[in-house]
Image (spheres, rainbow, N blue to C red):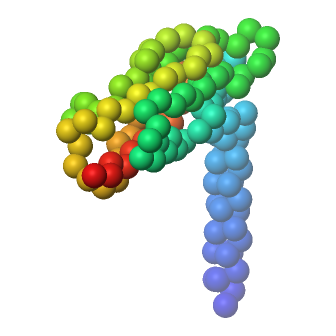
Amino acid sequence: MVYLYPRRLYGIFTLNILLLILMAMNTGCNNTTGTDKNAPILVVDTTTLYFGTLLTEKTFSITNSNTNEGAKKLDWMVSSDERFTWCTISPDAGAGDATVTVKVDRRGLSEGEHLTSLSVRSNGGTITIKVYVVVEK
């Protein structure tokens, strides 16, 4: 039993040192912006665009939520799967805050619900927007 006690102390000491090292490594970090307080932060006002059976055009907003003085400009681009030609985006790239228009063309689509995803990529993060359209015959 005398031999277990020093090992237990050594184990607790080692664990505490490892925890302190891990805490020091995470100090000042933020999941969104890392250590750069002026890095842009991408925000969109929706993650779903539902067109139903009648709508052909919808919009969503792209903004930089970093309001720090000296915040960097948000550079972004929007892309969709090239197989889904029934969905168009305008503009598909830009800098700063913007309103993006998404249009759908049901011609040639089969009856039922169709889904695609838009990917908004930027120097402030990436967000996916789901696009749903319904075709009735």
Q: Is residue 38 left or right of residue 128?
A: right
Q: Nearer the viewer, residue 89 or 80?
A: 89
Q: Is residue 63 visible?
A: yes
Q: Residue 72's spot in the image, x, y percent?
A: 64, 12
Residue at (40% x, 23% y) in the render: 89
Q: Is residue 81 left or right of residue 120?
A: left
Q: Residue furthest front?
A: 137
In the rendered image, the vertical position of residue 117 relative to residue 124, given as above or below = below
Q: Nearer the viewer, residue 11 or 24?
A: 24
Residue at (67% x, 41% y) in the render: 26
Q: Residue 67's spot in the image, x, y percent?
A: 77, 19
In the rendered image, the vertical position of residue 7 relative to residue 115, given as above or below = below
Residue at (64% x, 54% y) in the render: 18
Q: Residue 113's spot in the image, x, y percent?
A: 34, 53
Q: Is residue 71 left or right of residue 114?
A: right
The mark tally for this picture is 0
Q: Nearer the viewer, residue 109 or 116?
A: 109
Q: Is residue 132 visible?
A: no
Residue at (66% x, 21% y) in the render: 64
